[in-house]
Image (cartoon, rainbow, N blue to C red):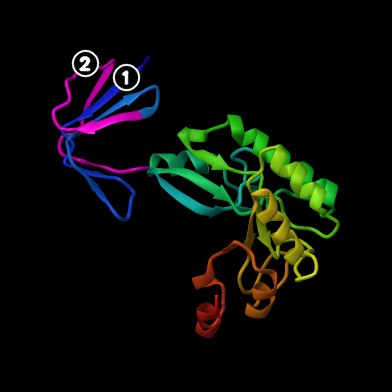
Amino acid sequence: MATILIQNIGRIFTGDIDRPLAEGDSILIEDGVIREVGADLPPAADQVYDAKGSAVLPGLVDCHVHVAISEWTPRQSALAWLEAYGAAGITGVISAGESHVPGRPRDAAGVMGLAVLTQRIFEKLRPGGVKVYAGALIPEKGLTEEDFRRLAELGLTHTGEIGLGGAVSAEDAGEMAKWGRKYGIKTMCHTGATFLEGTTLMDTERILSIRPDVICHLSGGGIPEEGMRRF
């Protein structure tokens, strides 16, 4: 069992809003899991690091990225950007839809295949130590309740933004939000105007009719203050 001790920590942040600081100056880690936080823990570990009074905090999470295949993001001509995230302390990212794949499919079978493929890639791949929560199904017309049941069974946890695909009404996307809640798949929704070809303006009335679990980038989505209050 590999053990790591970080000692001489100046301040330990917990990430818990009700108890933001932990008492102590040392953290003991066993096999990648924090086992003890305290003061003056004995340095009997495989590796010992001196924090020299630095603060220690949980890795940050970017809750809205658009990954493609591995770290290749052709729309931004970007490579190794997730490794750079990890170096900056962002150790987790959540895909809001794998929408930057060139020629991405727009049929039900295609978006299901893309979601499963991407989820499986990042299930094993952690660029720079970053955990990527990928496999965000882009809602398209033609998806069924059985598809959502099957995707949940395969381990998918959330959709991409409603508005990226063709399912954008209460009749189709609203039903998908209900199926998601039934099978444990969270639905995400774009807010405001769009810039990608084939995407849809998502205004206040449309979003309220769909009732998604997550409303993305609300403050920068072009929704007026009155609409924000209604959300």
Residue 145 rendering spot, x and y as whole percentages: 80, 53
Please identify the quarter of the rendering in which residue 189 is found. bottom right
The reply to whether the magenta stretch includes residue 197 is no
Magenta range is 34-58
Q: Residue at x 28, y 15 (%)?
A: 46
Quadrant of the image occupied by residue 70: top right
| Residue corresponding to mark 1 | 3
Q: Secondary structure at mark 2?
A: loop
In the image, residue 64 sits, relative to residue 35, either above or below, namely below
Residue furthest front in the image: 182
Badge 1 density bin: few <14, some 14–19, many ≥20, Cα 10 Å: some
Q: Position of residue 105 (x, y in %)?
A: 81, 50
Q: Residue at x 71, y 60 (%)?
A: 178
Is residue 124 among what the camera can see?
yes
Identify the residue position indicated by label 2 in the image. Answer: 44
Q: Nearer the viewer, residue 78 or 55?
A: 55
Q: Is residue 52 magenta?
A: yes
The reply to whether residue 202 is in sight is no
Which residue corresponds to the image point at 32% horizontal and 26% vertical from the top-left?
29
Pointer 1 and pointer 2: residues touching (CB < 8 Å)? yes
Give the vertical position of 2 relative to 135 (above or below): above
- Left or right side of 81 for 143: right
Name the quadrant of the N terminus: top left
Q: Nearer the viewer, residue 57 or 212?
A: 212
Q: Residue 220: where, in percent of width, then height?
A: 51, 71
The x, y position of residue 120, in whole percent, is: 67, 34
Look at label 1 and name its amino acid.
Thr
Where residue 83 is drawn, which disc sits there? Answer: none
CA gap, disc 1 and disc 2: 9 Å
Question: What type is the residue that disc 2 sits on?
Answer: Ala
